[in-house]
Amino acid sequence: MVPYSDLAWKIKAVHLEAHDQRLFDLLGKISSEEDAAGRGMLSAVVVHKFGDRQPGPGFFELAEELGRDTSDILKCWVDESRKRFMPSGRPDPDTSTIRRYSS
């Protein structure tokens, strides 16, 4: 998992802050494209740094738009997160997705 602020800091192509609407739009676009490619919502791994340590409300709004059951947001998030991890519990080795969008 990566906090929004850490992700924003790692993106060098454009200056973004943790609560920047452009970051949220970027995550939505990436998640939509990854989902269309059958890899689930990549933004499931981007979370609040403090508090609930879950994705923000935009994640769940997009999840609903993509046809996910969001009646139990914790279950929705866990299900999407599992799509991004291999059975061993290690992150998916294909990290090129974030790099592709951040360069």
Image (tube, helix red, strand yellow):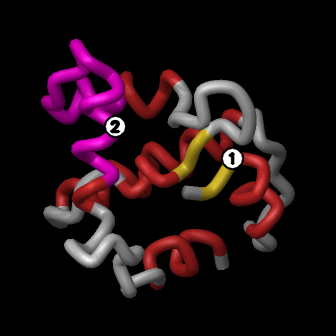
Q: Position of residue 102 (x, y in %)?
A: 64, 71
Q: Amino acid at mark 2?
A: Trp
Give the crowd class for mark 1: few <14, some 14-19, many >=20 residues within 10 Å.
Answer: many
- Which quarter of the rendering shows the C terminus? bottom right
Q: Compute the Cα span from label 2 to label 1.
A: 16 Å
| Front one among 100 and 50 | 50
Image height check: is 36 above or below 90? Answer: above
Q: Position of residue 27 (x, y in %)?
A: 51, 49
Give the crowd class for mark 2: few <14, some 14-19, many >=20 residues within 10 Å.
Answer: many
Q: Which residues are magenta?
A: 62-81
Q: Position of residue 65 (x, y in %)?
A: 24, 27
Residue identifier under label 1: 4
Residue 29 badge: none
Q: Is residue 74 left or right of residue 5?
A: left
Quadrant for residue 33, please give it: bottom left
Residue depicted at x 22% and y 64%:
39
Q: Is residue 7 within the magenta segment?
A: no
Q: Are marks 2 and 1 in contact (CB under 8 Å)?
A: no
Q: Position of residue 70 (x, y in %)?
A: 24, 20
Q: Is residue 14 left or right of residue 52?
A: right
Q: Amino acid at mark 1?
A: Tyr
